[in-house]
Image: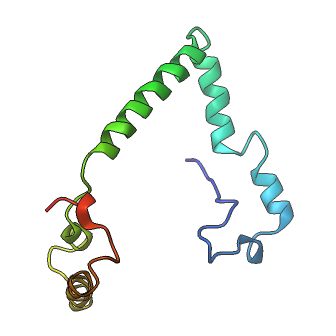
Amino acid sequence: MTLIARVGHHSTSDDFTLYRSKEEVKDWEQEDTDPILKFSKWYDLAFEHLDTEALKKDTKKELLHCLKLAESKKKPNIDALFCDVYDNLTPNLELQKKELKRFLIEYPQAIDTSCFSK
């Protein structure tokens, strides 16, 4: 089992310094407890025979290609905002969906909807 701790803000409204002391954060940022540093060290040892610079370069190239491809496609239909959490919309979400549709009709210039699928 691995125990890890978040040593940063969870969100813009979360000040982790209210519940984590500087000493605790410093302890978690040590090389032997930081999971990212531990993984990086393990990876370097396990794959030292690989040309990691070439791998990074190829991966970055592929990632940028995929990003460009994704950005060239239309975004999902605006209704998709409301259908990815619950099987049936809650009354609150139903209201928000109706308000959004009304807003888009009333203020068509407010949001460019041409980038969304129909």
**Which residue is located at x 62 percent, y 72 percent?**
12
**Residue at far front of view:** 109
Query: In which quadrant of the rendered image does the C terminus lie?
Result: bottom left
**Residue at far right of view:** 23
**Which residue is located at x 55 percent, y 47 percent?**
1
The one nearer the camera, 24 or 48, is: 48
The one nearer the camera, 108 or 23, is: 108
Residue 44 against residue 12 in the figure, above or below: above
The one nearer the camera, 94 or 23, is: 94
Residue 47 against residue 111 in the figure, above or below: above
> Residue 36: image x %, image y %?
63, 41
Residue 41 against residue 84 in the figure, above or below: above
Judging from the image, the colouring scheme is rainbow
Left or right: residue 87 versus residue 35 is: left
Residue 56, by quadrant, is: top right
**Which residue is located at x 30 percent, y 43 percent?**
72
Residue 30, by quadrant, is: top right
The one nearer the camera, 17 or 1, is: 17
> Residue 19: image x %, image y %?
73, 75
**Which residue is located at x 43 percent, y 32 percent?**
63
> Residue 109: image x %, image y %?
31, 76
Give the total of numbered labels.
Answer: 0
> Residue 58: image x %, image y %?
47, 20
